[in-house]
């Protein structure tokens, strides 16, 4: 592959990225990684390891204290978003599904919530209606469209939150703990949606501590440690096979089984 081709395929480039809350509480300490177009990436780590913060950086909700974060050759800074054209272009390309769906659901009805994002980005109403109807059918939430989001179950809220993000048809999909608190059936449905989104060529970055799903949703895995640094990276098979790495970063624990002599590993 030529250098030009490699550069063209680079989507996010993070070099020495640091971030702290209120300037006192470190959340990320020198993150170096690259995400390419069409790649499926999983960010795994225990609670408090910085995964969600990193997704918020990728979505330009916050900006690095130190280091550089580059998207498609342009550094993401507060100043860069003063350019209305750049801001609109970026917001149309990047979609984030928050860990807490309540953050995304604030309109009186599900229908209005799904339509809100694309309308704000200047998508014509006719096109928004087409997207809404297609997503409702695909996600099987047609019967929820005229209900208040606050009347929905956790699984239904997650589906609707996913729909609100997909309605802008982002090229990059960021997800924060998408299966947290879901029953197995709903989790499986959401994973199938991610697989379908990947087949359409989207870049997908998922933050999770659920090791059971990473083989289905990722080609590359980055492990975030409790020191807010990257503790390791590799394919899902390589990471899942590295018991010492997972145990050291509180992603699994090993304990003696009460009824047998052998040890049991749990995620």
Image (spheres, grey):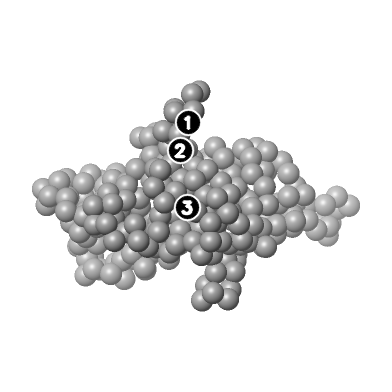
Of all residues, the one furthest to the top in this rendering is 1
Tell me what residue is drawn at x 57 percent, y 40 percent. 220
Q: Mark 1 Cα within 10 Å, few/some/many (few <14, many 20+)? A: few
Tell me what residue is drawn at x 62 percent, y 38 percent. 235
The C terminus sits in image quarter: bottom right
- Percent x, y for residue 187? 47, 51
Nearer-N-terminus badge (1/3): 1
Tell me what residue is drawn at x 35 percent, y 35 percent. 200
- Percent x, y for residue 15? 55, 50
- Percent x, y for residue 6? 48, 31
Residue 177's disc number: none
Q: Which residue is mark 2?
A: 10
Tell me what residue is drawn at x 53 percent, y 61 percent. 66
Secondary structure, mark 3, is strand
- On screen, residue 24 versus residue 144, left or right, reads right
Secondary structure, mark 2, is strand
Secondary structure, mark 1, is helix
Of residues 256 and 235, the one nearer the viewer is 235
Q: Which residue is mark 3?
A: 69
Report the Cα–Cα distance between label 1 and label 3. 17 Å
Q: Mark 3 Cα within 10 Å, few/some/many (few <14, many 20+)? A: many
Q: Is residue 76 visible?
A: yes
Nearer-N-terminus badge (3/2): 2
Report the Cα–Cα distance between label 3 and label 2. 12 Å
- Asked if the residue at tag 3 contacts the one at tag 1, i.e. Cβ–Cβ closer than 8 Å, the answer is no
- Asked if the residue at tag 2 contacts the one at tag 1, i.e. Cβ–Cβ closer than 8 Å, the answer is yes
Report the Cα–Cα distance between label 1 and label 2. 7 Å
- Quadrant of residue 169 within the rendered picture: top left
Q: Which residue is mark 1?
A: 6
């Amino acid at each position: 592959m030529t250098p030009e081709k490699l550069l063209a395929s680079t989507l996010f480039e993070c070099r020495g990225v640091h971030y702290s809350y209120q300037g006192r509480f470190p959340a990320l300490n020198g993150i170096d990684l690259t995400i390419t177009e069409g790649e499926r990436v999983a960010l795994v780590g225990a609670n408090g390891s910085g995964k969600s913060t990193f997704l918020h950086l990728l979505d330009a909700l916050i900006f690095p204290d130190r280091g550089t974060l580059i998207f498609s050759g342009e550094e993401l800074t507060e100043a860069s978003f003063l350019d209305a054209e750049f801001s609109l272009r970026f917001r149309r390309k990047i979609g984030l599904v928050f860990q807490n769906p309540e953050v995304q659901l604030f309109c009186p009805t599900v229908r209005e919530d799904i339509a809100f994002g694309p309308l704000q980005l200047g998508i014509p109403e006719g096109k928004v209606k087409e997207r809404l109807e297609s997503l409702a059918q695909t996600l099987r939430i047609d019967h929820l469209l005229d209900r208040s989001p606050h009347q929905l179950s956790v699984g239904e809220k997650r589906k609707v939150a996913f729909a609100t993000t997909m309605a802008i048809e982002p090229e990059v999909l960021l997800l924060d703990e998408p299966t947290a608190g879901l029953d197995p059936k709903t989790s499986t449905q959401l994973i199938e949606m991610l697989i379908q989104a990947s087949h359409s060529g989207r870049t997908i970055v998922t933050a999770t501590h659920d090791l059971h799903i990473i083989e289905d949703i990722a080609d590359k895995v980055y492990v975030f440690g409790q020191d807010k640094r990257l503790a390791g990276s590799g394919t899902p098979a390589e990471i899942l096979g590295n018991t010492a790495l997972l145990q050291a970063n509180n992603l699994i624990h090993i304990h003696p089984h009460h009824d047998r002599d052998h040890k049991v590993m749990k995620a």
